[in-house]
Image: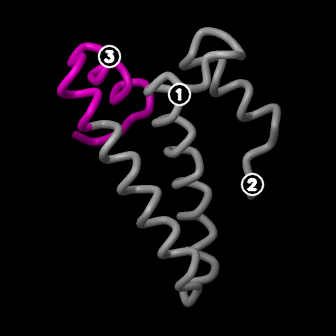
Amino acid sequence: MSLTKEKKAEIINTFGGSDKNTGKTEVQIALYSRRISDLTGHLKEHPKDKHSRHGLLKLVGKRKSLLAYLKNTEIERYRQVLADLDLRK
């Protein structure tokens, strides 16, 4: 299932504070996490879909690099994002 405009706006409001704040690291991590969970569900139904698996691995790598950046710059925001998104670290 793709990310609808309403869901995306809800995620942006939750993590960014306003509709316009889409570049905030927390917003990007949250959007990547949502897309990762959607792709994971897709791959459970279609295990031989190698192209989607490749896209999933790219998204995981992007999210990982954003988390590393946030951890190195502002550790409190990093911990808050991990708690809000229930990511294991």
Which mark sits nearer the N-terminus, 3 or 2? Answer: 2
* Residue type pointed to by label 3: Arg
Residue 75 in the magenta stretch? The answer is yes
Task: Give left or right: position of 8 versus 58.
Answer: right
Q: Picture quarter containing residue 48?
A: bottom right
Q: Which residue is mark 2?
A: 2
Disc 2 marks which amino acid? Answer: Ser
Looking at the picture, the colour scheme in use is: one colour
Q: Is residue 87 above or below residue 58?
A: above
Residue labelled with disc 1: 27
Q: Which mark is residue 69?
A: none
| Element class at badge 2 | loop
Q: Which residue corresponds to the image point at 46% horizontal and 56% vertical from the top-left?
A: 59
Residue assigned mark 3: 77
**Picture coordinates of residue 1 (x, y %)?**
74, 58
Residue 1 vs 83, above or below: the answer is: below
Mark 3 touches mark 1? (CB < 8 Å): no
Marked residue nearer the N-terminal end (3 or 1): 1
Which element type, helix, strand or loop, lies under badge 3?
helix
Q: Residue furthest right?
A: 5
Q: Is residue 9 above or below residue 64?
A: above
Q: Magenta span covers which residues?
A: 68-89
Is residue 3 rendered magenta in the image?
Answer: no
| Label 1: few (<14), some (14–19) or many (≥20) C-alpha neighbours in 10 Å | many
How would you classify the magenta stretch by its main secondary structure? helix
Precedes in sequence: disc 1 or disc 2: 2
